Image (cartoon, rainbow, N blue to C red):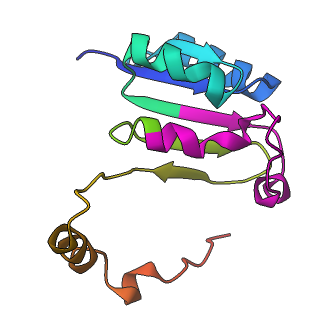
């Protein structure tokens, strides 16, 4: 079985730790790293990863603060989804006890395609928050 290519984005010790953790994995290989999503854009095109991890050591409160135009932190992970809609993105925050796996699907901008995509969404009951098992 071929190892899955993984690109890591982040400039924290947490991101470095993740890269080190995967260095010895037979099923995952780190194909590249970048300190910010902006810096990652060109490298992702070159390395063709199968998944992207955005590693952050910030609290979730930081994620809600709108970034300033000249800011270059890992909060701009949304641009990775827009640029690479077919590559799953994993949001890993050191301050959280869960990971967020984000997949994206690009559809045509026709009304029929939008209606079809809406009808394929999970039912409302399946979207209820899960109770944490502790």
**x and y percentages locating residue 110 in the rendered image:** 20, 66
Q: Is residue 16 above or below residue 74?
A: above
Give 114 or 5, whichever is nearer the viewer: 114
| Residue at x-position 52% and y-position 37% | 80
* Residue 117 picture location, percent across and down: 24, 70
Nearer the observer, 68 or 59? 68
Q: Residue at the location (77% across, 23% down)?
A: 11
Please name the residue shown 40% across and 50% down the image. 103
Residue sitting at the far bottom:
125
Q: Position of residue 122 (x, y in %)?
A: 31, 77
Question: Up-down: is 16 above or below 94?
Answer: above
Left-right relation of 49 to 65:
left
Q: How many marks?
A: 0
Left or right of residue 113, residue 35 in this image: right
Quadrant location of the N terminus?
top left
Q: Looking at the figure, which quarter contains the C terminus?
A: bottom right
Q: Is residue 105 magenta?
A: no
Q: Residue at x 56, y 33 (%)?
A: 53
Q: Position of residue 104 (x, y in %)?
A: 38, 51
Q: Quadrant of residue 74?
A: top right
Question: Residue 56 magenta-drawn?
Answer: yes
Extent of the magenta region = 53-82
């Amino acid at each position: 079985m071929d190892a899955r290519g993984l690109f890591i984005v982040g400039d924290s010790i947490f991101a470095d730790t993740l890269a080190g953790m995967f260095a010895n994995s037979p099923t995952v290989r780190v194909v590249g790293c970048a300190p910010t999503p902006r810096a990652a854009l060109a490298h992702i095109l070159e390395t063709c990863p199968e998944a992207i991890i955005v590693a952050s050591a910030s609290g979730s409160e930081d994620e809600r603060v709108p970034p300033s135009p000249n800011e270059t932190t890992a909060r701009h992970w949304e641009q990775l989804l827009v640029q690479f809609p077919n590559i799953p993105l994993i949001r890993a925050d050191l301050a959280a006890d869960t990971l967020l796996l984000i997949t994206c699907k690009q559809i045509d901008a026709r009304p029929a395609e939008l209606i079809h995509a809406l009808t394929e969404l999970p039912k409302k009951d399946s979207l209820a928050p899960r109770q944490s098992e502790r």
